[in-house]
Amino acid sequence: MRKVSLLVSTGNLGDNIIEKGTFYEGVKRDIDCFGADAGTADAGPTFLGADMPHNPIEWERHDLEITLVEARKKKVPMIVGSCSTTGTDRGVNLYADIIRSVAKERKMEPFTMALIYSQIPMETLRERVGKGATEPLGASFPLTDDVLDNTTNVTASMGVEQIMHALEKGADVIIAGRACDDAVLAAYPVFKGFDRGVSLHMGKAAECASLVCWPQKVKESIIGTVYDDHFTIEPIHPDQQATPHSVAAHSMYERTNPFIQALPGGILDMHASKYEAQTDRICKVTGSLFVPSPDGSYKVKLEGAGEAGHRVYHLVGIRDTRAIAHLDQILADTRKKVSDIIGPARDDQYELFFHPYGKNAVMKENEPVEITRSHEVAIVIEVISRDIELATSVAKCAKFRFFYMSYPGQMNSSGGSVALVTDEPLFPKNKCYQWTVDHLLTLKDPLDPGIFRYTFETVPGA
């Protein structure tokens, strides 16, 4: 029976390190391709906006080195997408430098490396916006010059077509910019002629490696195998199982609709997908479909971020159940008093946030527990402003007001229910960034050279 097998060892290359035990066990198997996603928007907008690395470079090198060495031993492709978390040109160049360095140190035989860049020059994007080629995706506003004026970096998320182009040109190692997670793994099976829907669902299921299995373990290797009409997921760790439950659950997570995954050129439709236990450790999935866009359009997701200003924190602890019971009122009173002191005319020059850990800091207004029974809570005061002095003053003012809060049943005269870790404002190393672009860009050609740029080189090794 025709098949291709991919070894997937990490859901985010370089974010901590691949576990070597199951990796090398997996390498013993019949592997046709090594695939790894290295990016995420979960880390927030700072890393894209500032174009800075998220992971220690030694972790990045660790994962790239062990994967490259084994891929070249087997003489099979190695595909990495969304380099260095954000998939910017800097990330692609960083990974390419690591690959060159490892090849030289390991005295490898020469091989072909493809670099795919997906960071969009701002002048190019302005031109496309002017032609009406963009539309909102998650954003509630259209893409305009004003939005781009407040954006520092933008990437386009590639699908399988761009990676397949590099494979068609004979690339042994593909280092790609921002890419759809599932496309990084699906590109090779589709390139080899396997069904796109089956391949994409395999990519979706395997994108986070061992997190698709139970019990949960991270950075352990799994094997995703694509056949003509189905795919399988098999863990390498002896204590893990890929069950119908675990694979279905992972297929559905991070979706507004659990049965549909939008992709460039269409959707992955999982309504008819059937999950079966092939063995007690291997899950088989059938029935997944790729449905092309009804109008034949090809759209890629744009991610962009830009500076929001400076961020200043303060931290106070409250140890009085009476105060905690009236915390919403206290926060509202504190916000009003800060506005009075700083001056209402400056309200639009800063943003003030209260994060009450121990009450609803995580779920915010979606928190179903209405009555807080904690005996203490921590209030993280967060202030964002383009004026760092103003942000500092607001944070200090808010901290100060918590020492003089007033609430029903209060028994202390002042300050007795508040504690500080430090009386100093806390200043993060980096400025505050915000997501500015969450839109779609329509392309007439998936390989549009204005959006996706390629370089091919022979890495000489020794």
Image (tube, grey):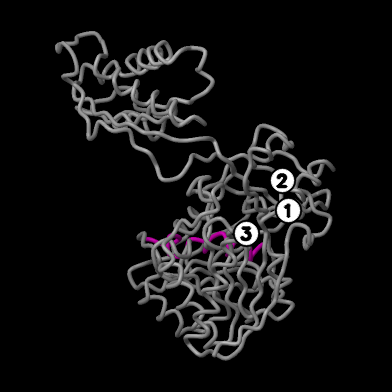
Question: Upstream in the sequence, badge 3 or badge 1?
Answer: 3
Q: Residue at x 46, y 13 (%)?
A: 343
Residue 415: horizontal and vertical position, in percent?
19, 18
Residue linked to disc 3: 179
Q: Is residue 41 magenta?
A: no
Question: Is 207 covered by the magenta stretch?
Answer: yes
Q: Nearer the viewer, residue 48 or 66?
A: 48
Give neighbour class at mark 1: few <14, some 14-19, many 20+ (Cα, 10 Å).
some
- Read off the magenta span: 197-214
Query: Where residue 106 sits: x, y (%)?
Result: 47, 87
Nearest the camera: 182 or 143?
143
Check the image and report above or below for 287 versus 235. Answer: above
Between disc 3 and disc 2, whose residue precedes?
Answer: 3
Q: Residue at x 61, y 89 (%)?
A: 110
Secondary structure of the residue carrying numbered label 3: loop
Q: Is residue 142 above or below residue 95?
A: above
User: Is the residue 270 above or below the residue 107 in the image?
Assistant: above
**How many residues crowd mark 2 within 10 Å: few (<14), some (14–19), many (20+)?**
many
Q: Is residue 25 visible?
A: yes
Residue located 24% across and 18% down the image: 403
Marking on residue 266: 1
Residue 277 locus on image (x, y percent): 47, 66
The residue that label 2 is drawn on is 440
